[in-house]
């Protein structure tokens, strides 16, 4: 039912975000990231339900695809029916993921990472992967969840990032974005809030605090996805499910 209501063609939003980065190397101009978040496998989302979402990502042929957490709702096994859909995502520099707060339930996050890993989706757990794009390097940093992980080691995650690299930071919970932002970090990609899921008076207070859909923090841009799945009820009001495409733009091209 939720797929028909929210994840069929024309039901979800394809959101475009252009982020201007001063000093962006020419090789990274136009670099596009497909950002998915908050799938919440379980009662409302299962095998095949992301079919049209994946097709919408692949038709754009993004340079990179990321999934910023909450693969499950209650149990680690809820992630397994989503593996086939996610494994069909195509991006020239790969598909990467981080965990959200729900993913630690039962402390089986290693099993989730293994199931996706064998299908080519790598979880970044307080670590950085370097993507070479022409003569430029993009440093993709992924953090464990700020609320539910046993520990979060930001220093370790950023240890290899150098001043001449463009940093993209993946952090499920956007609440600490102002602490995470820094010169050289072009973008922070987060989810968690569902855009409130039901963005109407009174009900807004039931979800996580929402910092905004796009927030400029110095030279860092925070992009918060409304996500694709739901929790509690298979319903969204004024907070549509979405794919976010983030394109890096050189300052002089604005």
Image (cartoon, rainbow, N blue to C red):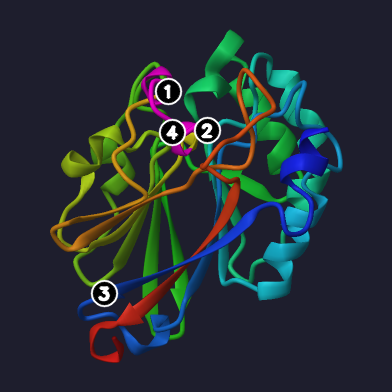
What residue sits 27% from the left and 37% below the top? 154
Marks counted in the figure total 4
Residue 241 or residue 133, whichever sits in front: 241
User: What residue sits right under mark 3 in the picture?
Assistant: 21
Mark toward the start of the polypeptide (1 vs 3) = 3
Q: Residues within 10 Å of mark 2 (few under 14, many from 20)?
A: many
- Quarter of the image holding residue 60? bottom right
Residue underneath mark 1: 207
Residue at the top extreme, as displayed: 106
Mark nearest the camera among 3 and 4 is 4
Q: CA distance from mark 4 to mark 2?
A: 8 Å
In the displayed structure, 7 sits above or below 232; it is below
Element under disc 2: loop
Task: Look at the numbered discs 1 and 3 and tell me whether their residues touch, using CB distance below 8 Å.
Answer: no
Camera-near label (4 vs 2) is 2
> In the image, what residue occupies the spot 52% across and 42% down?
239
> Contact (CB < 8 A) between labels 1 and 4?
yes
Q: Which mark is residue 197?
A: 2
Q: Position of residue 125 (x, y in %)?
A: 45, 36
User: Relative to the observer, which residue lies in front, 206 or 225?
Assistant: 206
Q: Which residues are magenta?
A: 195-207
Q: CA distance from mark 1 to mark 2?
A: 8 Å
For marks 2 and 3, the one nearer the N-term is 3
Q: Are marks 1 and 2 in contact (CB under 8 Å)?
A: yes
230 to the left or right of 175? right
Dot 1 or dot 2: first in sequence order is: 2
Cα–Cα span, label 1 and label 4: 7 Å
Q: Position of residue 162 (x, y in %)?
A: 23, 63
The numbered mark, 3 or 4, whose residue comes first in the sequence reads 3
């Amino acid at each position: 039912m939720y797929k028909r209501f929210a994840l069929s063609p024309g039901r979800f939003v394809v959101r475009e975000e252009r982020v201007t980065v001063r000093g962006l190397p020419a090789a990274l101009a136009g670099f596009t990231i497909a950002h998915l978040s908050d799938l919440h496998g379980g009662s409302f989302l299962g095998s095949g339900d992301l079919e049209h979402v994946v097709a919408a990502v692949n038709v754009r042929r993004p340079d990179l695809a990321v999934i910023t957490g909450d693969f499950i709702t209650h149990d680690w096994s809820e992630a397994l029916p989503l593996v086939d859909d996610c494994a069909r995502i195509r991006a020239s520099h790969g598909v990467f993921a981080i965990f959200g707060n729900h993913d630690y339930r039962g402390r089986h996050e290693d099993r989730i990472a293994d199931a996706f890993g064998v299908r080519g989706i790598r979880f970044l757990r307080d670590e950085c992967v370097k993507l070479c794009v022409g003569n430029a390097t993009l440093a993709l940093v992924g953090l464990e969840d700020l609320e539910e992980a046993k520990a979060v080691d930001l220093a370790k995650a950023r240890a290899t990032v150098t001043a001449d690299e463009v940093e993209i930071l993946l952090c499920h919970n956007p609440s600490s974005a102002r602490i995470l932002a820094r010169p050289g970090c072009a973008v922070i990609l987060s989810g968690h809030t569902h855009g409130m899921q039901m963005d109407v008076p009174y009900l807004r207070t039931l979800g996580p605090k929402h910092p905004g859909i796009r927030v400029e923090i110095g030279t860092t841009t925070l992009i918060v996805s409304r996500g694709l799945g739901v929790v509690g009820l298979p319903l969204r009001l004024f907070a549509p499910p979405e794919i976010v495409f983030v394109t890096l733009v050189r300052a002089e091209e604005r």
